[in-house]
Amino acid sequence: MTFDEAFHRVLGHEGGYVNNPNDPGGETNWGISKRSYPSVDIKHLTRDGAKVIYRMDFWDRVKADQLPDGVAYQLFDFAVNSGIETAVRALQRAVRVADDGHWGPRSQAALERMSESDVIMHLCAERLDFMTGLKKWPFFGRGWARRIAANLRYGAIDS
């Protein structure tokens, strides 16, 4: 999985410009929120500008290039939607190691002992458990569940 492929998929989940008062991220464009990027002109953020942010602040930070393709995409999308540490901790639980939020040699070794499809299934289950516990589930839960369902379909293709 290349970053470009993963980015294209993520943008399939993320819409254009929105400023929904129920969204804790506030003003958002291409999935990039004002809350996380206060110095960015969100309303005028270009697709290419969002791509730079996604590469540097998400794909590279979760070390997606070091993961199996299907897992790389799932972790990247989870990190975009819920934060890097949350996504990494969920992946650690999925591979049954201590969820300290730091991906290291033990986490990597545990991942390598599991099939890619098993990791994807466990990670999506962790993600759904996490999302259903959020206060904003009544507002956004249907969309989040559909996103996870779409990612399960990608997982079937990728593994």
Image: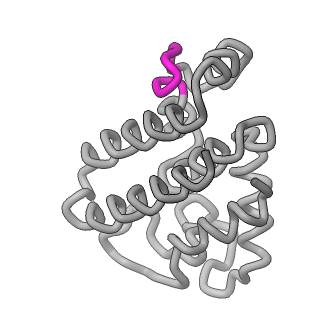
Looking at the picture, tell me which residue is in the foreground, 154 or 33. Answer: 154
- The prevailing secondary structure element of the residues shown in magenta is loop
Vertical order, 141 against 19 (above or below) = above
- The answer to whether residue 95 is magenta is yes
In the picture, measured across the screen, residue 133 lies left or right of residue 23, that is: left
**Residue that appears at 75% across and 53% down:** 1
- The answer to whether residue 9 is magenta is no
Looking at the picture, tell me which residue is in the foreground, 89 or 152. Answer: 152
Looking at the picture, tell me which residue is in the foreground, 77 or 36. Answer: 77
For the image shown, how many numbered marks are present on the structure?
A: 0
**Residue that appears at 26% across and 47% down:** 132
**Residue that appears at 75% across and 69% down:** 51
Vertical order, 31 against 113 (above or below) = below
Vertical order, 123 against 44 (above or below) = above
Q: Which image quadrant: the C terminus?
A: top right
The percent position of residue 36, horizontal first and vertical second, equals 58, 58
The percent position of residue 52, horizontal first and vertical second, equals 80, 65
**Residue that appears at 51% across and 40% down:** 120
Q: Based on the displayed image, in which of its 4 quarters is residue 116 positioned? A: top right
**Stretch in magenta:** 92-99
In the picture, measured across the screen, residue 12 lies left or right of residue 129, that is: right
The percent position of residue 113, horizontal first and vertical second, equals 63, 17
Looking at the picture, tell me which residue is in the foreground, 159 or 18. Answer: 159
